[in-house]
Amino acid sequence: MEYVEGHPPPLRYHPSCMINRDYKNFYPGGFFHIYNRGHNKNSIFKDEEDYYFILARTRQILGLQKSPSKWINPLPSNSFAILSYCLMPNHFHFLIHQKTNVSISKLMGKLCTSYSIFFNKKYNQIGSLFQDQFKAKLVDYDSYLLHLSAYIHKNPKAPYKWSHSSFYDYLGNRNDHLVDKNLILKMVGGQSKYKDFVDDYNSEEELLIGHLTFEED
């Protein structure tokens, strides 16, 4: 995707997408906000090991990290780019670019199933960990990527103290190869300007992407 500073962002639309905002018809080149939460809004992350596991498993599924399990078969290389993420105690957010015909459904199916097995075994639970199937919102304007990234990173009340998001990577405090920061940093004009953008991001700007954000129903 090319973004030219000073020019209005183009509409990003694909004819195979459904009309409603929860898209499950993924396509190469599409950008999507992916999120889900715990069943009955219960916690899905209870300690540091849980946060570590889901990120490690994401890297393993994407082929960025070797898996200790013979049951984890990585997806084809360079199928996806994770632009931003945030893991909260009872929900998660990912901003994902699908780069090939390999569907985000395959990525999230592998990840949620694997994490559910880990979590239920660890905490001696049975039944569904997540409320439902994950939600997916198509990012239909290029500029919305920037706003959505700020929204995701400002999910915690104290984003500078919350290490379970890619905000640490955007600030230069960590360099996790899971996260592709280049596009969004290019759009805003660099690391320091991104920090200022997130600091200044407010509820009025959030209204611009209200159709892409977490549903509280």
Image: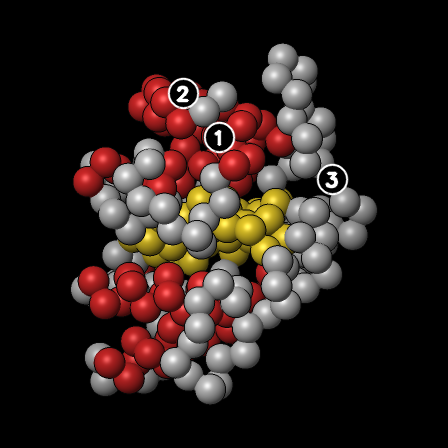
In the displayed structure, does residue 18 sit left or right of residue 143? Answer: right
Q: In the image shown, does 65 or 61 lie closer to the viewer?
A: 65
Q: Mark 3 touching mark 2, by CB under 8 A?
A: no
Gap in Å between the C-alphas at discs 3 and 2? 28 Å
Amino acid identity at mark 3 = Tyr
Which secondary structure, mark 2? helix
If you read the primary sequence from the N terminus, does the residue marked by circle 3 or circle 2 appear first?
Answer: 3
Amino acid identity at mark 1 = Leu
In the rendered image, residue 25, in percent from the top left (x then y), is placed at 69, 57
Gap in Å between the C-alphas at discs 2 and 1? 8 Å
Amino acid identity at mark 2 = Lys
The residue indicated by pointer 3 is: 13
The residue indicated by pointer 2 is: 193
Q: Residue at x 40, y 20 (%)?
A: 193
Q: Residue at x 33, y 36 (%)?
A: 172
If you read the primary sequence from the N terminus, does the residue marked by circle 1 or circle 3 appear first?
Answer: 3
The residue indicated by pointer 1 is: 185
Q: Residue at x 55, y 31 (%)?
A: 144
